[in-house]
Image (cartoon, rainbow, N blue to C red):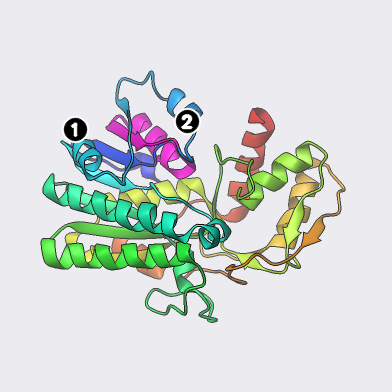
Amino acid sequence: MGFQELTFPQNSLFLVTGGAGFIGSNLCEAICDMGYQVRCLDNLSTGKIENVNRLKDRENYSFMEGDIRDLDTCMKACEGADYVLNQAAWGSVPRSIEMPLFYEEVNIRGTLNMMEAARQQGVKKFVYASSSSVYGDHPVLPKVEGQEGNLLSPYALTKRVDEEYGRLYKKLYGLDTYGMRYFNVFGRHQDPDGAYAAVIPKFIKMLINDETPTINGDGKQSRDFTYIDNVIEANLKACLAPSEAAGEAYNIAYGGREYLIDIYYDLCKALGKETPPNFGPDRAGDIKHSNADISKARKLLGYDPQFDFEKGIALAIDWYKKNL
């Protein structure tokens, strides 16, 4: 079952932090389409005002500009909220290596502020973004929750700390927290620009513009690329999950494995291009291979992703062709 058939109490209010970003804005849009109330909180540091503007005329959508590093802002944002989907964070492994103090402020203190505000305001469910980067250098595939290695970046550390706070807030305060370990999410509205843009939108835009993309490393690294609608489903099903499933982190992926070089040539074929890529150095802090075991999320959250890579990438290419 996809997320569109899920039902919540009438007049439910969802707070989506980072709601002007890629994942957050897709969550806002999906929840608005389902007829529930959405409050978006974002400071527009990495989120886009265009993602707010496309929803601002909806009667069941409101935008609050503010920063999760400020507890008073978090308290105000959580007022009356039934469910919090905390997507606000700074992403990018390489950038976190350059800016470790800033990542600590936003991704750890900001998330802690949100958990505390949610606790004080009586929020029912607190669902937050974690990351597959928490697996670090653990070599075994597929990745299974509870089998993590040494962390490779400040970004990964911030997400691991968030998970530990999520566990404690359930144990100490009874706040139902659910960590979403995202694996390489892609899809509509993902920003193709900037030095730290995700590879799929970046490659698509450059190929459409007859530019030559650079692949970091040899292209033989593999990823569990996950279409955005699977992520929306996971977040909403976490909001409906039993309290016994709280205080845990879950792999959110499709459970597949794609090699970067294969994706590159698939994109070339789909876009009618014959552009050999450039190859650059490996990125610091990157994991070589990533593939998720999603059985825990299936069992405890009822997660049942509907979009494999082929289905998702066809939809993404179609969207970028129309919107770039």
User: In the image, which residues are magenta?
Assistant: 20-44
Disc 2 to disc 1: CB gap under 8 Å: no
Q: Secondary structure at mark 1?
A: loop
Q: Quadrant of the C terminus?
A: top right
Q: Which of the 4 image quadrants contains residue 261?
A: bottom right
Q: Secondary structure at mark 2?
A: helix
- Horizontal relation, residue 167 to residue 102: left or right: left
Which residue is painted at 54% across and 69% down in the image?
291
Q: Where is residue 195 shown, x and y percent of the image? A: 64, 48
- Going from N to C along the chain, the mark reached first, 2 or 1, is 1
Q: Amino acid at mark 1?
A: Gln
Asked whether residue 142 appears in the rendered view, the answer is yes
Q: Amino acid at mark 2?
A: Asn
* Residue named by callout 2: 51
Asked whether residue 240 appears in the rendered view, the answer is no
Vertical order, 237 against 133 (above or below): above
Nearer to us of marks 2 and 1 is: 2
Give the numbered dot on residue 10: 1
Q: Where is residue 70 shown, x and y percent of the image? A: 27, 43
Classify 10 Å Cα crowding around label 1: few (below 14), some (14-19), many (20 and above): few
Q: Is 27 contained in the magenta span?
A: yes
Classify 10 Å Cα crowding around label 2: few (below 14), some (14-19), many (20 and above): some
Q: Is 160 contained in the magenta span?
A: no
Q: Where is residue 316 shown, x and y percent of the image? A: 61, 42
User: Is residue 84 or residue 107 the one in the foreground?
Assistant: 107
What whole-number distance in Å separates the C-alpha atoms at marks 2 and 1?
25 Å
Which residue is painted at 71% across and 56% down in the image?
263
Vertical order, 148 against 243 (above or below): below
